Amino acid sequence: MRDVEVGDRLPALVKVVTTEQLVRYAGAANDYARIHYDHAHARERGFPGVIVHGLLKAAFLGQLVTEWCGPDAWVRRFSVQYRRNDFPAQPITCHGRVTATAADSVELELWTEDPERQVTTKGTATVVFGPSA
């Protein structure tokens, strides 16, 4: 296993979502909820504008983990909880921290932050180093 210690931080990953990307993601995920692409509808529902899909934020956290662990590891467990909304054109910063280590695996705490550094998504992952057998 690579040299990893509790408290180690994963390199931050910053994503800026466009409305076009939300429309494309809606097609890929078959999630056509209008709050993700129709500004007037989103405002009618009490949002300041369209919101980023929760699963897209989960995908960003998955990207953070897989870019950090590399091809010689695999994700055994991954979960997220959505806490706040994110909006197009605003940076979504993905963070991670090692919370536990074992002989061949690590536990990670994951989260996204909006431009005001409010946590918008929280998550955890278990990464195993070595063959996926």
Image: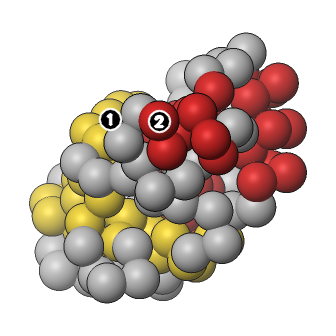
Which element type, helix, strand or loop, lies under badge 1? strand
**Residue 37 position (above or below residue 127):** above
Q: Earlier in the sequence, mark 1 or mark 2?
A: 2
The quarter in which the C terminus is drawn is top right
Determine which quarter of the picture holds residue 100: bottom left
Along the line of sight, the residue nearer the viewer: 47 or 60: 47
Residue tagged 2: 44
**Residue 65 position (above or below residue 6):** above
Determine which quarter of the picture holds residue 72: bottom right
x and y percentages locating residue 24 in the rendered image = 85, 38
On screen, residue 99 versus residue 88, left or right, reads left
Which element type, helix, strand or loop, lies under badge 2? helix
Residue tagged 1: 79
**Residue 114 position (above or below residue 59):** below
The quarter in which the N terminus is drawn is bottom left
Task: Decide if residue 16 is in sight here.
Answer: yes
On screen, residue 87 versus residue 10, left or right, reads right
Q: Which residue lies at the image location 54% right of the left edge and 53% below the top edge?
A: 49
Single out the mark in the foreground, 1 or 2: 2
Residues at marks 1 and 2, CA–CA distance in whole angstroms: 31 Å
Characterize the local packing of mark 1: few (<14), some (14-19) or many (20 or more) Cα atoms within 10 angstroms.
some
x and y percentages locating residue 70 in the rendered image = 63, 62
Color theme of the render:
secondary structure
